[in-house]
Image: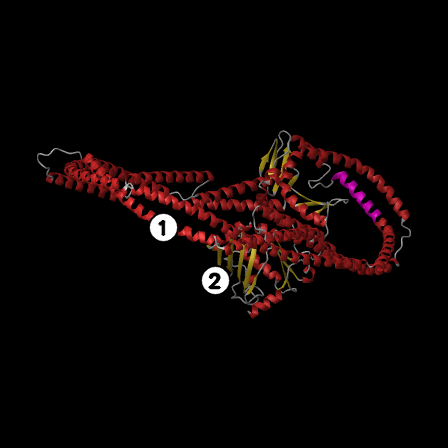
Amino acid sequence: MKLEQLRISQFRQFREPLVIDGFGPGLNLICGPNESGKSTLVRAIRAAFFERHSSGTLTDLRPWGDSGAAPEVELRFSHADRQWQLSKRFLQRKRCDLTIDGQRFNGDEAEEQLAAMLGFNVATRGASKAEHWGIPGLLWIEQGMGQELDEAVSHAGDHLKSVLGASLGEVTSSGGDEVIRQVRVQLDELLTGTGKPRGDYKLSGERIAVLDEELQALDQRIGAYRQQVDRLGELRQQQAGDEADKPWEALRVQQQEAERKYAEVQRQTEEQQRDLQALEQVRGHRQIVLEQLRSHEEQAKDLQQRQGKCQQLQQQLEQLAGQQAELVAAQDAALAAYQQAQQQERQARQWARRETLERERQRLLKQQQQLQLSLEQARLLQNELVTQQQALAAVRINDQQLAQLEQLHNQLRELDIRQQSIATRLRYELLPGQQLSLDQQQLSGSDELLLLQETQLDIAGIGKLIITPGGQDLATLARKTEHARDQLQVLLEQLRVSSLDEAREQLQLAKAQNAAIHANRKLLASHAPAGIEALEQDAAGVVARLAELEQELGALEMPVGEAAVDTGLAEQILQQAAAQLQQREAATGKHNEQLIGLRQNLASAEEECRLLQTRLDDPQRMQQQRKLNDNLLTLRAEEARLEQQSNERAARIASARPDILQQDIQRYRSSAAQLEQGFNQRREELLALQGRLQGEGADGLEEHRASLAAELESEHRRYHQLDRRTRALALLHDLLSEKRQQLTRRLQAPLQKHLDHYLQLLFPQATLEVDENLMPGRLLRHGQDASEFAALSFGAREQMGLISRLAYADLLREAGRPTLIILDDALVHSDQPRLGQMKRILFDAAQRHQVLLFSCHPDKWRDMGVPVRELEGLKTAAIEG
């Protein structure tokens, strides 16, 4: 998807129309100070896609104090080689118009088209919320929300899973066998459902944590001073080395040398272009000389051909002259035979007329019977078609509605499965004769129940237990399930059916009726192609024609005393005689034409031979041919010289690698600036560290540390015993679950591939795990412990969040889905080195996706290779325009 133009009017602070066009296919930077309208532009794009044009709750879109304003947004973009244009107006004179390659959609239909294209849901009432935003909610990052990824991924989860081509719900809902369950029970005695310790294991760990925290605090206090002293020495050594060497100056010298080499390559490239143009000119001139020489050779060959043609024409002329007398005699004999055959044909025609009329009368009698039968069949089929069409009109369902019904039915079934997979399981085993009351339902014996909502368990003589299962996920699923069930019921009522099976039966009935109607129409068309009325008219016409034939036969008179003559034979004889006569006349005429033509052709050929021989004997022509041969040798030598020179220079240019030289220039320039900046920052850090060390010490801490270390060692031994049992149970559980996890890993593989691509640019040899819900999990860095996503720093979570979103975008792009990326003041919490690496990542992603980056810090983004568009300048241009 590529945004091409944005126009807003009467939208928050933009009272007057503002048009922004010329968006590039990659990175687009739009910068401006705080409250200049950047977030308003993002809100306008979101409103154009997410908000229903008919909603009356979007009063926040109006300019402040203007209750009569009608906020309006217009977008023009391309997707899947098609042009899209969207126009929406809210609150006043509401409308929604969508044009796709000339095809127009309006109102709710247009909004459904947008939702299907981008992968989000249209809010049924009120303003849209995060749960409706789907894939755009994942790729369009709001200001200050870059580190919040869980909710956006969960709302886009269904769309992402459809891209992967599998349902993770089927994996997570599959239960383990009895062995896994028993291992899980024992493991639950030591660990909670979230993997945290419980019981003695938890108490021991907490005691170790308290002691370890105290010991670490002492170690930190002791080590801090030592580290600061060591750091001060390192800083002084580094500062002295940089102050003496000034390495940035050497880098700038290398930058100048790389620039000189690049300029030399550019000069050689220009010379190469000039030589290639000269080579093309030489080749063109050589081709012209070759064509001129070929023309001279063809003239000599043409003379030989023309002389041979003259001899051939002379022989043909002598042969034709001897055939003329024979052709004239044959023509006279053919004329006499034709006149005799013509007289016989007139007599035969009289007898043939009577026979023809009699045959036509018999044919019309048979046709009259067939028409009468077809007319009766057509009337029966017409009545049957009326009955079938009435039955078809009673069916109100089509394929699209059935597909919508099946989609709602499948969605409801998937939500039920997900509810059951995360619902609280209550397993009870009661003694004989004992009972419990669960929401006024008596329980006895043993069984297992799934609790989907808050439940009250009454224990006689003791009290009651209030069990609240799940949490926010289960409540959300319950609301989604109720909403899906309501939608299903509304659709069933609209279609006047009670179930999906009944809808399928009605659709099959309708298809059968359609097939029967189609077959009867074809049968009716075979009996009455032009309709029943035309068939009736044909039958009446046959009756009238029969009457005419009877009258004509009665009036027909035959010659008396003459025998019947076969008409076909007479006509055949006449045709043969006519053909023979025509053939003789044509042969005579053709012979005369050939004689005349041959005499003319012979005269023309002799004249052409004479003229061509004169041109070939011209001394000037022979001198011109020798000159052309000399020019050809010269041009071939020049062509060979230019080719060799061009190939040698091309090899020199390729070996110089101009693309690498450009990278060297950029690398040396950036490295010199960073080294000089690091030198200045280190000097400030050194001064601050010297001030801190003057007031710090480490007296009286070693004895207290030894006492805490002994107590901590004792508690560690007890904890390790519990930990070994816990790890053994966890390992057994993991091994038993490996087969199920293999399927999950295959589903995660496409997203993991794209995550690794970007992560290597930030943390080489690092891995960001993906859980079964396609959520980023632990960050595994080479030589460091794994870090959970939620435990990372604010800036690191923001960076991982952007990397994850870019990986999702690559995954969606491979599936042919729109991947417009919007970043509103992103990466504001990244330090300078990390920001530099994230720029490389963002620049790489912009080669495949269109990115709109809004920022109030234009100086941070001037090295991205694209122009910075100032929002204040765009507003001024709109006012002046």
Q: Is residue 213 magenta?
A: yes
Q: Residues within 10 Å of mark 1 (few under 14, many from 20)?
A: few
Residue depicted at x 63% and y 43%: 750
User: Which residue type does callout 1 highlight?
Assistant: Ala
Q: Which secondary structure, mark 1?
A: helix
Residue depicted at x 28% and y 46%: 592
Residue 675 in picture, x, y percent from top left: 78, 58
How many labels were placed on the picture? 2
Is residue 692 depicted above or below 744 in this figure? below
Residue 413 in picture, x, y percent from top left: 54, 40
Q: Give the residues in magenta.
A: 198-216
Q: Any mark on residue 93, and which?
A: 2
**Distance Cα–Cα, label 1 vs label 2:** 90 Å
Residue 524 in picture, x, y percent from top left: 30, 39
Q: Residues within 10 Å of mark 2 (few under 14, many from 20)?
A: few
Q: Is residue 366 left or right of residue 80?
A: left
User: Which residue type does callout 2 highlight?
Assistant: Arg
Looking at the image, is mark 1 or mark 2 earlier in the sequence?
A: 2
Outermost bottom residue: 880
Magenta stretch prevailing secondary structure: helix
| Quadrant of the rendered image containing residue 211 | top right
Between residue 317 and residue 232, name the one nearer to us.
Answer: 317
In front: mark 1 or mark 2?
A: 1
Q: Is residue 113 left or right of residue 687?
A: left
Outermost top residue: 432
Between residue 345 and residue 81, name the one nearer to us.
Answer: 345
Q: Which residue is mark 1?
A: 603
